Amino acid sequence: MTQNDGTGGIETRTSSGTVTNPGNDLRRESSVQEQSEEASGQDSLVRKIVGAKRQGTSMWEITVAECSEEKGQLYYRGKKYVPEDPELQLRLIKEHHDVP
């Protein structure tokens, strides 16, 4: 059986005892916004596009004129770009497609 242990960690109870999941102990889960901002800073394509946008140069990969930047986030044709971060991408899919 799995349950919250009251400290933010998750406990898994078995017939032989209790095993605490150390991956969840007392860590504050970052918001999607925070995770996205961090991933954007590490995504080389985001850095290239933002740099080209700021310098007024073009790129062959994308039409820079159709990109915008707001609060550290890249948008293409008004849609938010999701950085290359498998953990963030999976989180977004789960949050928007899983049934609560």
Image: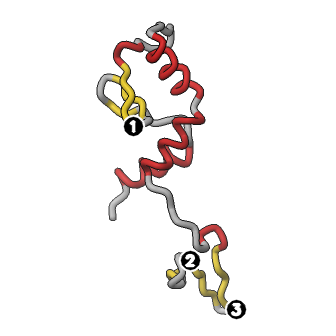
Who's the residue at 33% across and 65% down the image?
100
Q: Earlier in the sequence, mark 1 or mark 3?
A: 3
- In the rendered image, residue 92, in percent from the top left (x then y), is placed at 42, 48
Q: Is residue 29 above or below residue 92?
A: below
Q: Mark 3 points at which residue?
A: 16
The residue carrying pointer 2 sits among few (fewer than 14), some (14 to 19) or many (20 or more) residues within 10 Å by Cα, namely some
The tag on residue 10 is: 2
Circle 1 packing at 10 Å, graded few (<14), some (14-19), many (20+), is few
Q: Residue 23, percent across and down?
A: 64, 67
Quadrant location of residue 41? top right
Residue 77 picture location, percent across and down: 31, 23
Identify the residue at horizontal 54%, vertical 40% (top origin).
39
Cβ–Cβ below 8 Å for labels 2 and 3?
no
Query: Which is in the foreground here, disc 2 or disc 1?
Result: 1
| Amino acid type of the residue that numbered disc 1 sits on in the rendered structure | Lys
Residue 45 occupies which quadrant of the picture?
top right
Height in image: 51 above or below 95?
above
Q: Which tag, 2 or 3, sits closer to the chain's start? A: 2
Give the label on residue 37, or none.
none
Q: Which residue is drawn at 64% across and 74% down?
A: 21
- Please name whichever residue, 26 or 18, is drawn nearer the observer in this view of the structure: 26
Label 1 to label 3: alpha-carbon separation:
50 Å
In which quadrant is the N terminus drawn?
Answer: bottom right
In percent of width and height, residue 34 lies at 47, 49
> Pointer 1: what residue?
71
